[in-house]
Amino acid sequence: MPMAEPAARTRSIEPFYVMEVVKEAARLEASGTSVIHMSIGEPDFTAPAPVQRAAIEAIGKGTTQYTPALGIQPLRRAIAGWYAARYGLRVDPERVVVTAGASAALLLAFAALVERDSEVLMPDPTYPCNRHFVAAFEGRARLLPCGPQTRFQLTAEQVDSNWSAATRGVLLASPSNPTGTSIRPDALRDVVGRVRSRGGFVVVDEIYQGLSYDDPPTTALSLDDEAIVLSSFSKYFNMTGWRLGWLVVPPTLLPAIERLAQNLFICPSAVAQHAALACFEPESIAIYEQRRAEFRRRRDLLVPALRRLGFDVPVVPDGAFYIYADISRFSADSWDFAFEVLHATGVCLVPGRDFGNAEPRRYVRISYANAYERLEEALGRLEVFLAERHPATE
């Protein structure tokens, strides 16, 4: 008998196009080409020594068995303490749900909130997996075009004009992947107010808030205690492969989230949870702050240099480690441009195709999660390439 067909919902899940670029970069590297990666959103730093020691100690003590589905209490208390230290905000540890990465946090949130055919508003551009998390529960992600004039972030006016009978809520990200831009506190307050007045939910992805460089970050919890926020140990805390994140949810949502977590994930990694306790030690925080300063130094190298080369950076990113750059001066299609640059220079950029429908051919995402010296080398290669292929930009 023939194999069963995949479920119809899988047909709406597009490929992760960035991986096509990365695969080609890997092929070139295997053939001897020197490739400088400015593509994948992964810190080039790894977990610092205190976190590594805590993991080894946990394994040595045998604290590796199942934990409660919502996470170990010491870590839930430590995360609540993080909000007190960083934002001056009291968060009940019982509202903190430790998850198997931010992806699991989003899956749990949307499993609890999204009905079949319900709609979630989100900005375009946005992280591509976000719309698929909604689709997984047979909801619809409605992407609303957001340009440089709004820092690529959703506005209250867009919420007003696009809310429909099917709309259940919004998903925001601040700072955002792919743009590195935050939503300003007054704009966030307006969006939250409009959504809450309609009885909708507000989910805010804050996984890059630890990597904010200009103004102090604002958590949505300081504006709306009923907001659902998520974060991660991957970016600021440099624990990408450890797969650990968290949600802060309203008390009324907690029983549903707990049931879902029990059934879908059992629990997050025990070793990762015990290791993550060391993230909040003063020694670790000092290291993370040094690394944050280094990311800012890289941003401050790249933005003016790219502009000198002819890239249009319409909004200076204030967080994460991404620059969303307009390349329409060089090419009509960022997909073609990314492959042209990769083959000619070995510099690996990400075309805008993954991030939505709002002029993706104009933009590339440039990651500065690479060493400063490598970024300098990439700029040199790009300068030679553009002078040869696009001399009008000199």
Image (cartoon, rainbow, N blue to C red):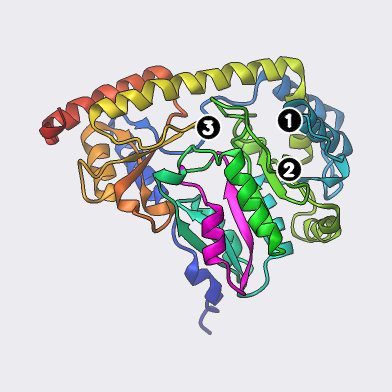
122 sits left or right of 335 in the view: right
For image coordinates 72% across by 19% down, the residue present is 50
* 3D distance between C-alphas at marks 3 and 2: 19 Å
Q: CA distance from mark 3 to mark 1?
A: 17 Å
Q: Is residue 265 visible?
A: yes
Residue 323 % position (x, y): 41, 35
Q: Which residues are magenta?
A: 151-175
Q: Amino acid at mark 2?
A: Leu
Residue shown at 62% from the left, 27% from the top: 216
Task: Work out whether mark 3 precedes mark 1 in sequence or the reverse, and give the earlier one.
Answer: 1
Q: Quadrant of residue 300?
A: top left
The one of 384 and 215 positioned closer to us in this rendering: 215
Which of the two marks, 3 or 2, is nearer to us in this view?
Answer: 2
**C-beta proximity under 8 Å, tags 2 and 1:** yes
Q: Which mark is residue 319?
A: 3
Q: Which mark is residue 165?
A: none
Query: In the image, is residue 187 above or below residue 316?
Result: below
The amino acid type, in three-letter code, at marker 1 is Tyr
Q: Give the label on residue 221, or none.
A: 2
Q: Quadrant of residue 71?
A: top right
- Front-most of residues 269 and 329: 329
Say what secondary structure mark 2 lies in. helix
Q: Give the SS element for disc 3.
A: loop
- As displayed, is residue 375 above or below residue 75? above
Q: Quadrant of the C terminus?
A: top left
Circle count: 3
Neighbour tally class for label 1: few under 14, some 14-19, many 20 plus, Cα within 10 Å: some
**152 inside magenta stretch:** yes
Q: Secondary structure at mark 1?
A: helix
